[in-house]
Image (spheres, helix red, strand yellow):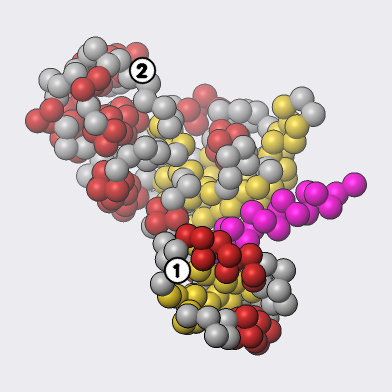
Amino acid sequence: MIARPENRVRNSEFAIDVRGLNKHFGNKHVVDNLSLQVRPGEIFGFLGPNGSGKTTSIRLMCGLLTPDSGSGTCLGYDIRTESDAIKRNVGYMTQRFSFWEDLSIHENLDFVARVYQTPSRKAAVNNALINLGLKERANQLAGTLSGGWKQRLALAACMLHQPALLLLDEPTAGVDPAARRDFWEELHRLAAQGISVLVSTHYMDEAERCHKLAYISHGALLAQGTAQEIVAAQKLFTWAIKGEIADESLTRLSGMLTNKPGVLQTAAFGNVLHVTGRDPAMLEKTLRETLVGLPYEMVRTETGLEEVFIHLMRTSAEARKAKP
């Protein structure tokens, strides 16, 4: 159990509570009227295509960047006027590994603890080594670590000052599935201790492990809630088309269905083609008519986050094209 010093974080119903945040870089509107809330002990996932404003949004919500307009609090502190207090209580982990590869794990953690003047430095470093399963590798050079172990080192460094909030910017990019699973088990252990986690990810299996999600495109929040709430809100229906489908056949079948009545989108998952629409009767009719005489089986399936986010990305792009 991580024991944080008392009275460092103000009592608040929400770890993050922001309203109407906007940020421009030059003529580019990077964050567009963002409002959301994150509760203590909640793992909140940020999803969206590259360049959608996820990283900037995270930094705004936690006082690391100043918004052009809007307001809010992070850990009970005002994001505009009390950013220094917020930074002292936040652990920030970037996608890029940024430690010294010619130093050992222990030396890296000790150096970070010295830089941040961590109280009881030796105990803090030792606890970080134990809590993240790094004790047996403490003397191993950081440069010789695999992606998964580098990730553990980065998280251990984030936890040295016992933060109340973790900001994780695509932390598992390039990490193997087993290491990703272990990392998420650690995040849930930390959340169970009351630590809030704000994490951006491109992986749908990781998104489903978050308590809440937000989907951002071109700086605008398109959907938020639990995975189940986001899927239900889109009111999409999906059929899986199965058979002995080679890549060429899959592409040809997808092309046959594009722009047909009731078909919103198609997406290949291995040797299965998922076809999604909003009108279940029209979608089924189109599929049955199209597949007559073809060696495919159609089966109703649950619409998943993958289909929903493909849909949100497409509709967002279409809306932007339609703007004068």
Query: Does 206 sit left or right of 240 as displayed?
Result: left
Tell me what residue is drawn at x 52 percent, y 24 percent: 84
- Membership of 310 in magenta stretch: yes
Tell me what residue is drawn at x 63 percent, y 85 percent: 289
Q: Secondary structure at mark 2?
A: loop
Q: Secondary structure at mark 1?
A: loop
Q: Residue 57's x, y, as percent? A: 60, 39
Mark 1, other Cα within 10 Å: few <14 / some 14–19 / many ≥20: some
Query: Which of the two residues, 121 or 229, is positioned nearer the viewer here?
Result: 229
**Image vertical order of residue 296 relative to residue 121, above or below:** below
Q: Quadrant of residue 211?
A: bottom left
Tell me which segment is drawn in magenta. 307-324
Q: Residue 285's x, y, as percent? A: 65, 86
Q: CA distance from mark 1 to mark 2?
A: 57 Å
Q: Residue furthest left?
A: 136
Query: Which of the two residues, 151 or 274, is positioned nearer the viewer here?
Result: 274
| Residue corresponding to mark 1 | 245
Give the number of callouts: 2
Q: Amino acid at mark 1?
A: Ile
Q: Residue furthest right?
A: 324
Eye-nearest disc, 1 or 2: 1
Q: Quadrant of the N terminus?
A: top left
Tell me what residue is drawn at x 71 percent, y 53 percent: 316
Among numbered discs 1 and 2, the one appearing first in the sequence = 2
For the question of whether residue 273 can be seen, the reply is: yes
Q: Residue 130's x, y, as percent? A: 15, 35
**Image vertical order of residue 313 relative to residue 113, above or below:** below
Query: Which of the two residues, 287 or 296, is positioned nearer the viewer here?
Result: 296
Query: Which of the two residues, 185 or 61, is positioned nearer the viewer here?
Result: 185
Q: Amino acid at mark 2?
A: Tyr
| Residue corresponding to mark 2 | 116
